[in-house]
Image (cartoon, helix red, strand yellow):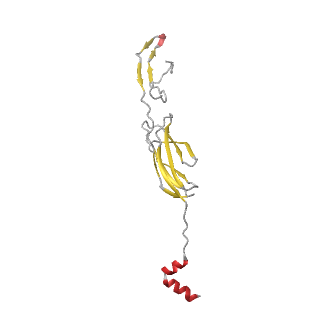
Amino acid sequence: PPLVSKFQTEMNYDPGILDYSTKYYWKIVTWLDYQKSYIGKKWTFTTEENFPPEKPSIDGPNSLKINKEGAFVVEATEINNDLIYFYIDWDDGTIIDWNGPYFSNQLVEYTHKWDTEDLYEIKVKVKDEYGLESEWNEFYITIKNPRFRVLNLYKLLDMFPILRFMILKLS
């Protein structure tokens, strides 16, 4: 392995962020005056494995009217506590493409509206900052066309005879 620190005078060394599932080696060589050195033994360790985020959750309304915006909350657990990014397919030709970064278990709200009556399958997945992806989670929503009820004046007058009486009196 390559030498990463030379002429170090501090008692500590910070190697920065290490890669997952990687074996690292180190050895300390102490130099004293007059070019005399003492070579320590070689040490090794292996960093932990990077696991993909768990399948995300999604919650929101089960039905909406056409062009009415709905709020959806997504959340995911990342076992290694890496930062995460969300990908959402709204099933109408629009997507949210790896939005983030967010913390593990952070609740994130997205809004969306549809312009066509149908049953839609919203799909969401998450990836960590190292590119490992979760499984998809699905959420179904029904988009309905608002129905206008035509009020029949005669039925209304039959339901409220006093109203009919007042209208007839005034005419």
45 and 119: which one is in front? 119
Q: Residue furthest bottom?
A: 169
Instruction: Name which residue lies at 53% across and 86% down.
Output: 166
Q: Quadrant of the C terminus?
A: bottom right
Quadrant for residue 46, please give it.
top left
Instruction: Name which residue lies at 44% across and 20% down.
Output: 25
Report whether 154 appears left or right of 29: right
Quadrant for residue 30, please give it.
top left
Against 166, residue 11 (above or below) is: above
Instruction: Name which residue lies at 50% across and 81% down.
Output: 158
Residue 101 at x, y percent in the picture: 52, 41
Against 133, residue 72 (above or below) is: below
Residue 75 at x, y percent in the picture: 46, 46
Report whether 145 appears left or right of 55: right
59 and 10: which one is in front? 59
Residue 146 at x, y percent in the picture: 55, 62
Report whether 168 appears left or right of 81: right
Residue 57 at x, y percent in the picture: 44, 46
